[in-house]
Image: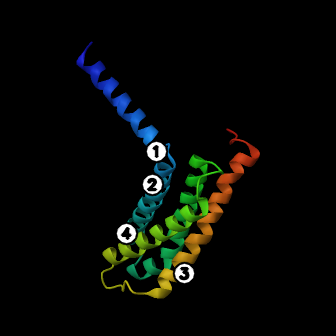
Amino acid sequence: MSMLNICADNARVAVENLKQSFASPLGIFIYASLSGIVGVVIVLVFLSMVFAESYLPLLLPVIISFNAATSGFHLVDKGGRSFPHLRISLIVISGLLVAAGCSFLTVLLPWESMADGLRYLISGLSALIFSFFGAWIGSKKYEYGSYVDI
């Protein structure tokens, strides 16, 4: 057996172990949370290069809401409708996204206050609403069957 085959087999085993670890409810929760947090960070960095800095605090609830919807969708899409503690998981993901978004906003804009309660309230409520909306959209996959390829 050549060295290349051994490396390919080891890589295949590592990928299978990674897939199995993300197949558990905790793995699915981590995947949904991290995809939302990374999405918030990427969009904030991109928009900081496109828009003036004064627009970022105004756009933060929109950015967090979009990523909360995708996280809710991923949670139901990967975990199914019977995901354990779905509501609590969506609430925790919403809180994580708000904390990550507001914290990273102060990294990008150090002069912005971290103690802006209105920003947390608006971002938190919109994240909560849209995470449940994303989970609802994800549950429609199970109601109507799988997606149709066009």
Q: Earlier in the sequence, mark 2 or mark 1?
A: 1
Q: Earlier in the sequence, mark 2 or mark 4?
A: 2
Report the residue marked by disc 2.
30
Residue at (33, 30) in percent of width and height: 11
Report the residue marked by disc 4.
49
In the displayed structure, would residue 118 be above or below residue 81?
A: below
Q: Which secondary structure, mark 4?
A: helix
Left or right: where 59 falls relative to 9: right
Mark whose residue sits in front, 2 or 4 = 2
The alpha-carbon separation of the residues under discs 4 and 3 comes to: 24 Å
Circles 3 and 1: CB atoms closer than 8 Å: no
Percent x, y of residue 108:
33, 74
Q: Which secondary structure, mark 3?
A: helix
What is the quadrant of the N terminus in the image?
A: top left
Q: Earlier in the sequence, mark 4 or mark 3?
A: 4
Q: Residues within 10 Å of mark 2 (few under 14, many from 20)?
A: some
